[in-house]
Image: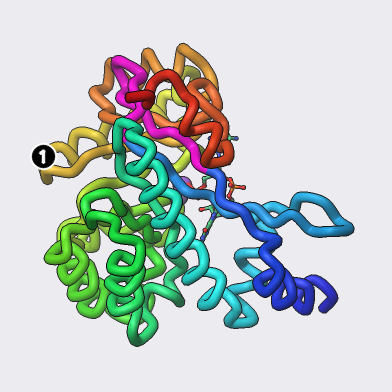
Amino acid sequence: VRLRHDLHYALQHEQFELYYQPIVDAVSGRTRGLEALVRWHHPERGMISPGVFIPLAEQTGQIIPLGRWVLMRACQDAAVMQAANMRMVPVAVNISSLQFRREGFIEDVLQVLDETKLPSEFLELEVTESVLLDGAEKAIALINQLKDIGIRVALDDFGTGFSSLSYLRDLPIHKIKLDRAFIQDIVSDRNNAAIVQGVITMAHHMGLVVVAEGIEAPEQQQDLVRRCCDLLQGFLFARPMPRDAILSLPDVLP
Ligand code: G
Ligand code: G
Ligand code: MN
Ligand code: NA
């Protein structure tokens, strides 16, 4: 109850911050994208994980203003990166299903792009399978609208939800992000390895890009390179960090 109230206050008092985690080319390790991850600096409790407050914000409906703030800040930061002559890569923003399916979402996105003057190719959106909860048609239409604007959509946490292959067939997405639950034991667990290989092969046949999340060890990278995974994300390469730390990464300097 307390946190709920604090969340409302936090939005008005700039207690949120966006961190960015590099997404890298599997073979070269070169940065190819950034994922924006929200952080809450609570005045008394310190840093609170989005794993805790995002579900709460979804329950209270505060995910709508919070989600809008995240989208705006990510595009502002991306525009700053572009102005700083950084080697530009797309910034991926996590979109809650509630926010995604809400009336006016596309208009919000267009307004943020217009206000920040960020070219749409530098914004990506990450959604989960729960965007399909009240029917695939609406999700398909929304993703197609985003595609028309020039914004690519990734299917996040792939394999952990109520994954149905027919959804994968019908959704006009650009990439899938393999959840780190499959990556953790990829070197030692043959079943995990088989699932990962199957998903990568299938996705490539569908023209999709595959990202593996939660890479912590060089052995995992080697394994995924061998399986032709395109992109990797994880502590092995970089932790999420503030915008200005991204700007001084040697890999993205002009
Ligand atoms: O950064 P971290 O690993 O603690 O994130 C935990 C969870 O919170 C992840 O599932 C991530 O997708 C989610 N998350 C992080 N930032 C955002 C955000 O800005 N919006 C939404 N909807 N989810 C986010
Ligand atoms: O659900 P989503 O994929 O958006 O969540 C991304 C979350 O994964 C972020 O909160 C980020 O902090 C976390 N993360 C990123 N890389 C690693 C990693 O190598 N290991 C672990 N355990 N978590 C990671
Ligand atoms: Mn994500
Ligand atoms: Na994920």
- Image quadrant where residue 207 sits: top left
Residue appearing at x 47%, y 24% in the figure: 249
* Front-most of residues 155 and 194: 155
Q: Amino acid at mark 1?
A: His
Residue appearing at x 71%, y 69% in the figure: 13
**In the figure, 162 relative to 250: above or below?**
below
Please, which colouring scheme is shown? rainbow
Q: Residue 20's spot in the image, x, y percent?
A: 50, 42
Q: Main secondary structure of the magenta part?
A: strand
Q: Residue most toward the bottom?
A: 103
* Residue 155 in view: yes
**In the figure, 6 relative to 117: above or below?**
below
Would you say the beta carbon of the disc 1 residue lies within 8 angstroms of ligand 4? Answer: no
Please state the total of marks drawn on the protein image.
1
Q: Residue most toward the right?
A: 44
Residue appearing at x 30%, y 15% in the figure: 28
Q: Residue 106's spot in the image, x, y percent?
A: 28, 76
Q: SS class of the residue under badge 1? A: helix
Q: Residue 128's spot in the image, x, y percent?
A: 40, 60
Residue appearing at x 37%, y 62% in the figure: 129
Mark 1 Cα within 10 Å, few/some/many (few <14, many 20+)?
A: few
Magenta span includes 66 = no
Q: Is residue 157 left or right of residue 197?
A: right
Instruction: Look at mark 1 in the image and give the residue it sits on.
Output: 205
Image quarter where the C terminus lies is: top left
Q: Residue 17's spot in the image, x, y percent?
A: 61, 53
* Front-most of residues 80 and 5: 80
**In the figure, 214 relative to 47: above or below?**
above
**In the figure, 254 relative to 67: above or below?**
above
Image quarter where the N terminus lies is: bottom right
- Image quadrant where residue 38 sits: bottom right
Which stretch did the figure color magenta? Answer: 20-32
